[in-house]
Image (cartoon, rainbow, N blue to C red):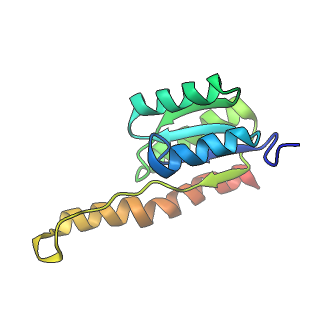
Amino acid sequence: MKRLENKVAIITGAASGFGAVDAKLFAKEGAKIVLTDINEENLKQVAEQIIQDGGIAIYATLNVTSPYDWQKVVEKTTTEFGGIDILVNNAGIASYSSFMESDYDTFKKIMDVNLNSQYLGIKAVAPAMM
């Protein structure tokens, strides 16, 4: 038996990197996957690969800093799969400039994506999980 059979997982940052790897692994374990990211082209490619490998996946573009986008993802997920069991809040960004070269706008964007989006995701998904 697959460990995540009949579970529904939303994975952020799923267009590449750890998010894409997580999505493929969860699908192999039987989860129905909702891939999310701002990069729709890569999302489509990852979803197609999961489907070709026998998994179940859909995708939705998501700006993790937008409560409105989160609500759309929750609605799409519950409409398509009937509920949500797992949230992998994986999306993240980084800056490669030194602290002295950094600016406040970049810092705020990093905090919004890497920290505040965690709150927004949990807040949006929790009612459907309960």
Q: Position of residue 81 (x, y in %)?
A: 73, 33
In this rendering, is residue 47 above or below 99? above
- Residue 50 x/y as whole percent: 61, 30
Residue at the farthest front position: 53
Name the residue at 77% across, 56% down.
Answer: 130
Q: Is residue 117 left or right of residue 98?
A: right
Of residues 93 and 125, the one nearer the viewer is 93
Furthest-left residue in this view: 101
Q: Residue at x 63, y 53 (%)?
A: 87
Image coordinates of residue 21 in percent, x first then y, are 55, 46
- Horizontal side of 67 relative to 129 (left or right) equals left
- Quadrant of the snapshot with the N terminus: top right
Quadrant of residue 5 within the rendered picture = top right
Q: Is residue 54 left or right of residue 96?
A: right
On the image, which quarter does residue 33 sit in?
Answer: top right
Query: Which x, y percent locates residue 90?
Result: 51, 55
